[in-house]
Image: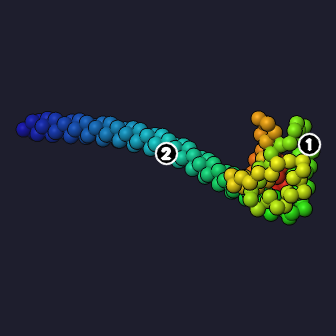
Amino acid sequence: MSNLDNLTQKILEDAKNKASEIVKGAEKRNDSLINQRVKEANERKEKILEKAAAEAEMLKDRVISSAELKVRDEKLSAKQEVMDTVFKMAKDKLSDLDQKEYLRFVESSIKDIDIEGKPSVLVKKEKVQQLKELSDEVALVEDESVDSGFILKDGDIIYNYTFDALVDEIREDLEGEIVQKLFEE
């Protein structure tokens, strides 16, 4: 029986060796599969991180750009507010001309116009007294719709010399120069 025992022993050893080889092969394939899956997961992770970094950079750029636009708009709004204040101050100062200066303004403005006949000068009630010296050349008419300055009517032609109209007329031409002087950067 010793041959039978030897043969059985040999078969068992061969089976153990074969089983060991199969287990080692399976472990090797398992390790290879795990390594491959880990490698794929790391590649995916890198792609996701790169995409997230790119999206974060793009979002950061958008936020910065938006903030810069908002700051620019606020600066422009503040500059416009200052410009409005400057022109309002100019209108107010013109409205507060003393009697002599106001009379000079009206006289020089009328001289610059080619007038036929005796025109009407429309002014606020308070200004009629200041312009009595002009009464030979023009017909003074009280008109409460005239806030400042005057309106000259020569027949069908109306010349608007109200301070609001005059300042608004030259505002566009002066804005660039005023902005340059006020906001030198």
Query: Which residue is rendered at x = 86% and y = 64% of the image?
Result: 98
Is residue 160 rendered to the left or right of residue 116?
left
Identify the disc placed on residue 73.
none
Please, is residue 39 above or below residue 148 in the view? above
User: What is the quadrant of the C terminus in the image?
Assistant: bottom right
Q: Earlier in the sequence, mark 2 or mark 1?
A: 2
In the foreground, 89 or 110 = 110
Is residue 117 rendered to the left or right of residue 52?
right
Query: Which residue is rendered at x = 83% and y = 43% of the image?
Result: 119
Spot occupied by residue 20 in the image (x, y as percentages of width and height): 25, 40
Q: Give the amino acid at mark 1.
A: Asp
Query: Which residue is rendered at x = 74% and y = 59% of the image?
Result: 125
In the foreground, 96 or 140 = 140
Provide the secondary structure element on which disc 2 rests: helix
Disc number lying in front (2 or 1): 1
Q: Give the amino acid at mark 2.
A: Ala
Residue designated by label 1: 112
In the foreground, 148 or 52 = 148
Q: Is residue 79 visible?
A: no
Provide the secondary structure element on which disc 1 rests: loop
Residue designated by label 2: 52
Check disc 1: other Cα within 10 Å, few if <14, some if 14-19, many if 20+: few
User: What is the quadrant of the N terminus in the image?
Assistant: top left
Query: Which residue is rendered at x = 56% and y = 44% of the image?
Result: 58
